[in-house]
Image (spheres, helix red, strand yellow):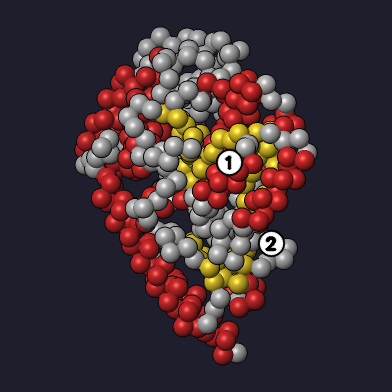
Amino acid sequence: MNWKKLSSQELRNRVFSALKRNKNYAEEMVLGIPASYLDPKVFHPDDKLLEDAPFLSTMVQNPNHIGCHTLDSSESFFQGTQEIEREAIAICAEDILRAEAGSYDGYIASGGTEANIQAIWIYRNLFVQEYNAKPGEIMILCSEHSHYSMDKAANLLGIGIRKVKIGNDFIQDVDSVNYELDEAIQDGVKYIIVVANMMTTMFGSVDDPEIYVKTLGEKGLAFRMHIDGAYGGFYYPFSNKEYKLNFETHYISSVTLDAHKMAQAPYGTGIFIARKGLIQYAQTKEASYVEGQDSTLIGSRSGANAIAVWMILSTYGPYGWIEKIFILQKRTDWFCEQLKSLGIPYYRNPFSNIVTMEADALSAEIAANYGLVPDDHHKPNWFKVVIMDHVEIEKLEALINAIKSLQIA
Ligand SMILES: Cc1ncc(COP(=O)(O)O)c(C=O)c1O
């Protein structure tokens, strides 16, 4: 276990000692970097405030975490806070996603979109370099409920994409997987980049990776599998202890998690983790002025984001995190009971905190008043409630009362 609960004093000490190991723009010779501390004319550093604020202090000191720090070497200027990033990655990879120590690489990306594109970029390059594949022979296979970052990836990387239908049970329809793959083979596709969902954006539903693996095996297609846990990565592993979308499953090669969703971290805290030996396929050798070169999509990125992720996880510790998810599960159970008693049709995966209601059972006014999110702003079929920390029972009760009033009217 890398993951330990720390007191606020321990957190402060750890971050401040890491900052001391970074090169300090103000106090040391850092003459060649095109960056500095945050502009004091604008941000007015208040020493008293910063004394007790490790995250803000890191923001002000402004370390750049460019590159990937689980590889052999990286920029030495900011090695103190890079070490904390490595610890955050280790918690995610080993304690949440069950990887063996030292068997992975990873970094804090700008978000789920970047982490998904990073995975697909790696596999496209792998198929080109190792199998001599042409871009037209490589295709993304995901579901109709997958996030649109897969479409961005296909467009940017010049490869195809096919989406399988989701059945009434909210997992992939086997006939549709067969159909899409047969069509792809006819189009000359030979190499498949599978993206399976660990909680979808709109429904919180979870794909069955075995459906993809079995069908791809039957057709003799080479594939690599990435898990999109941008939403579910900090939730599902805690609500469903039997979950399989992790590194114990041998055919899963990489995972996206997003700390800026369920982990309530600042935006800019997507997390990409892949088995060792893969991230090199995204290495840009031309990045010769960067120590250790760059194997990430983003380039420069704030070290403060890594500190935020590490601080959040270390404040809770593993048991605190289980409790946090337990409470959200209970609230979600309560909300579903109320919907059931009102006869409102909805979908909820039993291990998820997303409840998606059929739009016909609600009104546009209720959706607007309660900040519900539709599947399609032009023609909503569904509205979702995401039971986050701020979505307390009192707020859910107000929504239930509004639905009751609508039913009476
Ligand atoms: C399942 C899933 N994947 C990827 C993303 C993209 O994440 P981001 O907006 O952080 O780029 C989202 C965002 O909602 C998501 O729900």
* Labels 1 and 2: the sequence-earlier one: 1
Residue 104: quadrant of the picture? top left
Residue located farthest toward the bottom when viewing the structure as drawn: 408
Residue 370 visible here: no
> In the rendered image, which quarter contains the N terminus?
top left
**Residue that appears at 35% across and 26% down:** 102
Q: CA distance from mark 1 to mark 2?
A: 39 Å
Residue 349: x and y, percent? 47, 63
| Residue 377: image tag | 2
Residue 45: quadrant of the picture? top left
- Say if disc 1 is inside 8 Å of ligand 1: no
| Residue 217: image tag | 1
Residue in the foreground of this view, choosing between 186 and 358: 186
> In the rendered image, which quarter contains the C terminus?
bottom right
| Residue 230: image tag | none
Give the crowd class for mark 1: few <14, some 14-19, many >=20 residues within 10 Å. Answer: few
Residue located farthest toward the right when viewing the structure as drawn: 187
Tell whether 216 sits left or right of 55: right
